[in-house]
Image (tube, grey):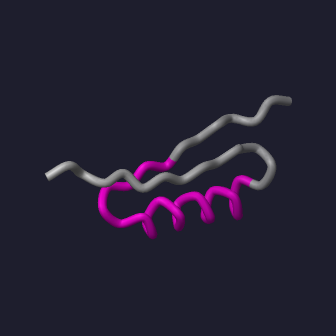
Amino acid sequence: MNKLKILFVCVHNSARSQMAEALLKHFGGNLYQTRSKQKLKNL
């Protein structure tokens, strides 16, 4: 079975995307392949 790939992107605060990734890994187990990324907003 192929894992569903999910990317969490957060603007300014990378901790949010990292927390979301950790929660999905915890509750989703081996069903998902997750990544997190911080995107800096251009001023």
Left or right of residue 9, residue 7 in this image = right
Residue 2 vertical placement versus 17 (above, below): above
Name which residue lies at 49% across and 49% down.
Answer: 8
Left or right of residue 28, residue 23 in this image = left
Name which residue lies at 62% across and 64% down.
Answer: 22
Name which residue lies at 47% across and 59% down.
Answer: 17
Report the predominant secondary structure element of the magenta stretch: helix
Left or right of residue 22, residue 2 in this image = right
For the record, the magenta segment spans: 8-28
Left or right of residue 18, residue 3 in this image = right
Q: Say if the magenta span includes residue 14.
A: yes
Residue 2: x, y in percent?
80, 30
- Front residue of 39/30: it is 39
Q: Residue at the right extreme? A: 1
Residue 19: x, y in percent?
53, 67
Residue 16: x, y in percent?
43, 65
Name which residue lies at 64% across and 48% down.
Answer: 34
- Front residue of 29/6: it is 6
Q: Say if the magenta span includes residue 27.
A: yes
